Amino acid sequence: MYQLLEKVLGFDASKMRVRTEIVAGSTTFLTMSYILAVNPAILSTTGMDKGALFTATALAAAIATLLLAFMAKLPFAQAPSMGLNAFFAFTMCQAMGYTWEQSLAIMLIEGVVFILITFFNIRELILESIPKNMRFAISAGIGMFIAFIGLKNADIIVAKESTFIGLGAFTPTSILGIIAILASGVMMARGIKGALFFAIILATIVGIPMGVTQIPQGWLPVALPQSLSPVFCHFDFNGFFTIKTLLVLFSLLIVNIFDTIGTIVGLSYKTGIVNKDGTIPHVKEAMMSDAIGTTIGSLLGSSTITTYVESASGIAEGGRSGMTALTVGVLFLFSLFLSPLFLLIPSAATSGALVLVGVLMIDSVKKIDLSDVSESFPAFITMITMVLCYSIADGICLGILSFVIIKGCTNQWRQLNATLIILSILFVVNFIFG
């Protein structure tokens, strides 16, 4: 039995425990389960059917994560990207005037291109071109970014006109978020296994009398899945071959490539699977599952798939193999029938897991060579712009640009490679025309 699990999912019985992997997968699922509510809400603003979108979201996440479990054997999870679903709805459909059917067609082509560049090792080449100090900065920056997401989701940090962001008011939502964060910290400090998982459950229950966890009248925990037919394979290729569409496609590729690469780099360092030479085992398979997932997601009617930074919550609980990802994928399939139950979890209840993951991932900073400004400056730019730009991809792009510029201006050309220089040129073009 264990030999089969090791062959299929990379589960090593001498170092891993089945219970730990299942708890880790459950924690990752609960931490990212908000996508089941948020993705349909965002995409439905384009006129797409919300019920069909829920089914599409759950199926796309399940298929992509199961592909990753068996192909890459890593404890990561995949689902529709939170940044790119907003790009789909608010930029492509509303600002640029594409119909949602045309936007889905663009997503389909993006997925096919992803498969091709992954097959020919172009994405892996890009990944291997990133310097080690930048990889550590990416890991730490992702930790800061997801901690910021947790604070924002709980309304602890809010938008303010005078200072852009600031401390929010003490509302039931923010108080529940504080409870979730403190509970997560205390449980983890006491060495409780499944601390983040239990903190999410505790916060959800506490949120009921506080009015944050909403239970609708006549609520039942089980419901049949909604039909996919209103969004399944609804593509419109009219007007596809234009300069505008090519720029949109390029922007999507750049953002998704670096969202995925950045997340995989950060999570891989957190799991400790990175080889001494800096290479990441099964990285091509992880990227291929992402590419195939994006293509399948567009067929189902969902936006681009990406690897989720929330996977770090399961890694923090000890997830180390594809069994963690398998658990996440199976739970996404179950969510098709238990959608009313999973939609009860308020985002504030998951804030503790996100903040604690940020605490755990920030330890990568100590591995950065801070004595050399030409190394510490790009690392700092990477970390701070991930948070301030609210984008992993923008943080990586600006970090690499600053790395190339500072190395070039200090006559350290030997530390640059052709891939970094080409990427820098593409980043500049994307920022100008994107």
Image (tube, rainbow, N blue to C red):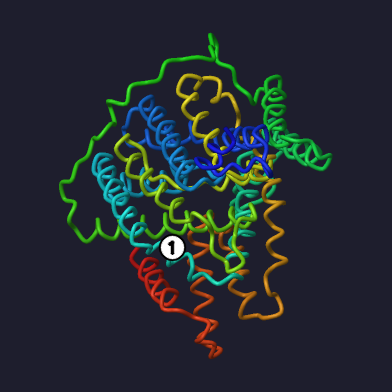
- Residue 301 image position (x, y, % from top left): 32, 35
Q: Residue at x 64, y 59 (%)?
A: 140
Residue occupying the far top of the picture:
218
Task: From this view, report whether residue 428 is shown above or below residue 100.
Answer: below
Residue sitting at the far bottom: 411
Q: Give the answer, above or below, for where 9 lies relative to 407.
A: above
Q: Amino acid at mark 1?
A: Glu
Q: Crowding at label 1, few (<14), some or many (≥20) Cα neighbours within 10 Å?
A: some
188 sits left or right of 37 in the view? right
Q: Quadrant of the C terminus?
A: bottom left
> Mark 1 highlights which residue?
124
> Please, is residue 395 above or below residue 149 in the view?
below
- Between residue 297 and residue 273, name the one nearer to us: 273
Where is residue 393 drawn, in percent x and y? 48, 59
Is residue 343 rendered to the left or right of residue 190?
Answer: left
Residue found 72% across the figure and 59% down from its top = 363
